Amino acid sequence: MTLPATRQSVAIELDSVVKRYGDHTVLDNVSLSVREGEVVAIIGPSGAGKSTLLRCINLLERPDSGRITVAGHAVDAGSEISNKELVAHRRVAGMVFQSFNLFPHLDVLRNISLAQERVLGRSRKDADKRSKELLDRVGLADKAAQYPSRCSGGQQQRIAIARALALEPKVMLFDEPTSALDPELGLEVLAVMRELADEGMTMVVVTHEMQFARDVSDHLVVMVDGAVLEEGPPEEIFSKPGHERTRRFLRAVLER
Amino acid sequence: MSLSDWAENYPALLSGLWVSIRVTALALGIGMPLGLLLALSANSPKKVLRYVTIGVVEIGRGTPALVVLQIVYFGLPTVDVTFSSFFSAAIALALTTAAYTSEILRGGLQAVPSGEVEAASALGMVNRDTLRFIVIPQGVRVAIPPLMGFAVLIFQASSLAYTIALPELMSQAYSTGSSTFRYMSILGLAGLMYAAITIPASWLTGRAERRMARHL
Ligand SMILES: Nc1ncnc2c1ncn2[C@@H]1O[C@H](COP(=O)(O)OP(=O)(O)O)[C@@H](O)[C@H]1O
Ligand SMILES: [Mg+2]
C-alpha cells in the first residue's frame, strides 16, 4: 500500500535539529520526516548520534536549535515548555531502551500499570486489565506476577514494549532493542516488533539487525558523525550504497 | 561484684534501659525522615538548594552529638526555648541522625540506575512520581543495612544524655553505682544491657546486608 506522500499525514518531523554537548556537536542539522504508519530504521556506527536523535524526539534531551514535531505537537528548541506539555509530548512517543530499564522492585503487572495510573489517571483495576491484555499480546500472560529479574532478557524487553504501549503512544521509538540480547532472544523481540509494524504502528528503530531493517522498515536512514549520510528504500541502500562510508559500515556489520 | 548487686539494682537499670530505648526510637523516628528530606534536596537539580543542604549536613556531621545535646538543653533556654531533658535528648539525637542518615540515604538514592529514571520520564511520569514510586522505594531499600548499623550507634550515643540528667540507662547505672559504691558490678550490668540490644541488632544488620547482596 503506497499512498502518495501528501495523503499520509506526518507523524514525526525533525527540522534542522542541532544538539551539542559542550563544544561537541552530536546532532548537526538533522532533518527527518516520518509518515504515519511508516517504519524507519536508523543504522550507523557507534557514536553517530542515533540514541541522541531518539532522545530528542521524545524530549529526554532538549535540542539546541531546530524544531521537533510529534503527532502534531511542535516544540521549538529554546522555547519554554511546561511540565504538562512535556508529559503530553512524551505520552505520544513510547520509548524502548537497549537495557530494558524495567523497574526491578515492581512485579511485571505493576511495571506496566504504574504509568497508566499516574499519567493517564486510570484506576488500578482498569490499568491492570489493560496490562494483562498487553502482556497477552507480547506472549507473556503467565508472567504478570513475576519480578523482572525472573524473566529472560527477551521477556524483559517484550515487557518493556508492553509498558510503553500501555500509554497508547502514536509513535514508538526503539533504541537498539535487541543489542543486549542473545540472537535467539532477540528474535522473539523482533517478532513482537514486526507484529506491531504490521498493525500500522509508526516506528523509528535504531538497530544493527540488518535483516529486520531490510524486511520490516519502509525507509532506511544511515547516520554518521551526527548527520544523515543517506536515506532511502532499504533495498536500494543495501544493494548499492551511495557512499563509501555506508559500504564500509555495512560490510563491518555483516562480517560480525 | 556479685549477683545480689544485680538482683537488687536491676529494676532501676531496666527502667533506664526503657528510657534509652524510647529516646532512641523517637530520635530515629524524627531523624530518619528528616534525613530522607535532606538526601532528596542534596540530590536536587536546583543548585542553591543542593549546596545549602550539603553545607547544613556537613555542619551536622562535623558537630559531636554531645555538643548538639548541650546546645539543645543548655543553649536554647537562653533564647527562651526550653525542652525537657527527654525531648532535648530526642531532638539532639534526631539532628545528628538526620545529618548522618542523609548521607547514607543519598548513596542509596544514587544507586538507583539512571536508566530507570529515564524510562519513567519517557513514560511521561513527573519527577515527583518518579521519586515516589521508583527512586525512593529502591534507594531506601539499599540503605536499610547501613541505616540499621547507624541505629545501633545512636542507641549507644543515647548514653550521652546522662549529661543532661535524663534517667536513661547510663545515668541510672551511674547514680546507683555512686550510692552503693558497687561501680564495677552495676556498670558491668549496664554494659550487658546495652549489649543485649546492640549485639542482636548488629546480627540482624549483617543478615539484612546478606539479603540485600543476594537480591541485587
Ligand atoms: N550526556 C552526554 N554528555 C556528553 N556527551 C554525550 C552524551 N550523550 C552522548 N554523548 C556523545 O554524543 C555522541 C553520540 O552519542 P549517541 O547518540 O549515544 O550515539 P549512538 O547512539 O549513535 O552510538 C557520542 O560521541 C557520545 O559520546
Ligand atoms: Mg546508541
Image: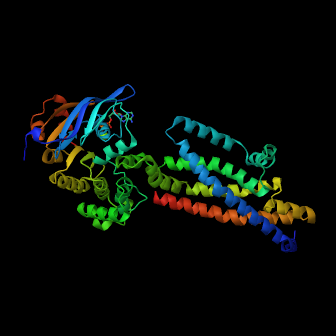
Depicted A243 relative to depicted B59: above or below: above
In the image, residue B2 sits, relative to residue B95, either above or below, namely below
x and y, in percent, of residue A30 in the image: 25, 31
| Image spot of residue A223 (x, y percent) | 23, 34
Is A78 or A99 nearer to us in this picture? A78
Q: Is residue A29 left or right of residue A247?
A: right
Taking B32 as reference, is B139 left or right?
Answer: left
The answer to which of B169 and B82 lies nearer the viewer is B82
Judge whether A18 appears above or below A211 on screen. Answer: above
The correct choice, above or below, for B150 with respect to A141 in the image is: above
Q: Quadrant of ligand 1?
A: top left
Quadrant position of residue B84: bottom right
> Percent position (x, y) of residue B130?
43, 50
Residue drawn at x 9%, y 37% is: A236
How many marks can you see?
0
Observer able to see residue A206: no
Specify whether residue B119 is in view: yes
Indicate the quadrant containing the C terminus of chain A: top left, top right, bottom left or bottom right.
top left
Image point (16%, 29%), residue name:
A244
Side (left or right) of A246 relative to B96: left
Image quadrant assignment for residue A151: bottom left
Residue B1 position in % (x across, y down) = 87, 68
Instruction: Say whether residue B14 is left or right of residue A43.
Output: right
Asked which colour scheme the image uses, the reply is rainbow
